[in-house]
Amino acid sequence: MSRFKNTAIASAAGLAFVLAPAQAQTVADLQAQIDALRKQLQVLIEQQQARPPADADQATRDAGTPATKADIQGVRADFENYKYENARQLERKVPSVTRNTSIGGTIQVRATWQNPVQNAGVANGATGGNTSYQATPRHTSFDIPSVTLSFGGNLFRDYKEGKNLTYSLGLASGSNFAGSPQSTSSADRTLGVASANGSQLNVTNANLAYSFFPTNGGLEDPKGTLTAGQQLMPFGLEAQANEEIRPVINSAQFTSALSGINTRQIGLVYRGDSFVNVDYTNNYRSTLIEYALGVVNGSGPNKSDNNGKKDWLGRLAFTLPADYTSWLRELRLGLSYYRGYNNLANTTTNAVVQIGRSTRAGFDLNYTHLPISITYEFVQGKDDTFAGPAALAAGSSPTFVKTARGQYLNIGYTWGEQFLASEKSLAKYDDYWPKSYQAFVRFDSFDADTLNDAALRAASVGDKTFITTLGLNAFFAETTKFQVNYLLARNDVPATGVSTADRPRRQQGLQVQFQYGF
């Protein structure tokens, strides 16, 4: 009995030893299966949570639906079709250029009224744009005074230092006037005879500019550019102001009366600045000194030099160093000088018999701190002139220096957001642009001969004009503005004591102009 008991015990121990590993393996498998089921359950829970609710819109349900292979293939096909159509449109409807080019332009539409009437035959088209015979006096006129087109871009881009070579090409329409504006007979000053359309397209800017200083650095870097070709002269403020920023419709009188400063010239001009002050908080840059120095033909735009002498000019401008928040910001003083030569001709034979000297000197003061802007500019011109009749002039004819003087004061007040630095950095939706309005008053005077002595020169008396302009400008788009100017002009009485219809004692006028650009 005891032997059987021992044998049974031994057999049970052996069986337990054999079955232990098998039982342990089964527990591990079950545990693995349980873990896998847990993971699958977690995935199902997450999918259920991600699934949009039953009342969700179609876009929400589509976002929760996985894309099929057919969907992906459809997107690829649509993308290929888009690339083909875009390339086709670029090839057929978009102009192409060899080099990078930006295109811009402006168009002006103007209506004018004046009293007394514009006398028949008077050279009114010089400012009004008249391009047809004026048989009778008139009070009103509709005009297209200016149409411009500009092109610009890079010819060489210096990616390392930013010393780029750029180009500029500008075109502008101008009235093709006939007759003689200098004639004493108003009938001879009738305009618009030479061209049936009354206008022609002229080259305004045609130049290359090279930057000697880096242009891809920080705001604190100075600037220096040499411009070769036809360009505006760096003289004063008014002569350099383009139509976009000039508040008044008509420029100051001296810009058209004194030759050389308001016309484009062909030559070399270097422009630069030094001692830069930067307010990084407001992204504001100002320079203590701005300067320009140039040598030009002096014969005007699109013309070769008409004598053996070159004209020289220079400008210095000083800006008070100040932070953006300072009330002294943008207080600037400028000095300008132009020295040139003009041809003195016999008006009977049109032959040049002498070369005279011409000088232009001026200073300007500008303070622009929104909403207030104040600008004052003074210019004096001196020209060698025949002492006797130009019709009898010869190489030995005596000359004198005639001095002309012009000045203006412009005071403006601007309200709105368009010119605020904070507004310029904000993104604009579609074609939205903040609006601004500007009211101003300008006092403009010009004296063609400051002698004012009838005993010495009768023409020196009665040649002074004083114009007061009240205006309102509305800037209601990025490149669009609407202008209304009321002008009151007063002409000095001539030596005869009697004003003429061509130059009445007093004049008043109203100008309404719409200017838009692209």
Image (cartoon, grey):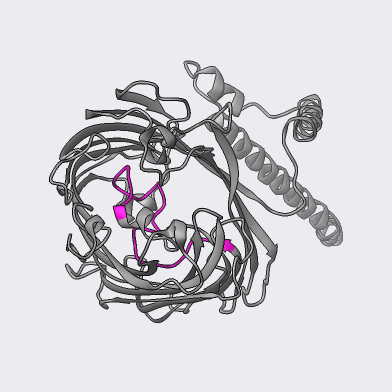
Residue 142 place in picture, x, y as percent: 38, 25
Is residue 57 visible to us here?
yes
How many numbered marks have been drawn onto this rendered protein structure? 0
**What residue lies at 57% left-to-right and 69% top-to-bottom?**
297
The residue positioned farthest toward the top in the image shown: 55
Residue 402 place in picture, x, y as percent: 31, 68
Q: State left or right for residue 336 relative to residue 23.
A: left
Is residue 412 visible to us here?
no
Q: Is residue 249 magenta?
A: yes
The residue positioned farthest toward the bottom in the image shown: 275
Tell which of 203 and 46 is nearer to you: 203
Residue 469 place in picture, x, y as percent: 19, 43
What span is colored magenta in the figure? 230-253
> Magenta stretch mostly in which secondary structure?
loop
**Image quadrant of residue 299?**
bottom right
Q: State left or right for residue 213 relative to residue 449.
A: right
**What residue lies at 42% left-to-right and 43% top-to-bottom?**
181
Residue 383 place in picture, x, y as percent: 38, 69
Q: Quadrant of the N terminus?
A: bottom right
In the depicted structure, whether residue 61 falls above or below residue 444: above
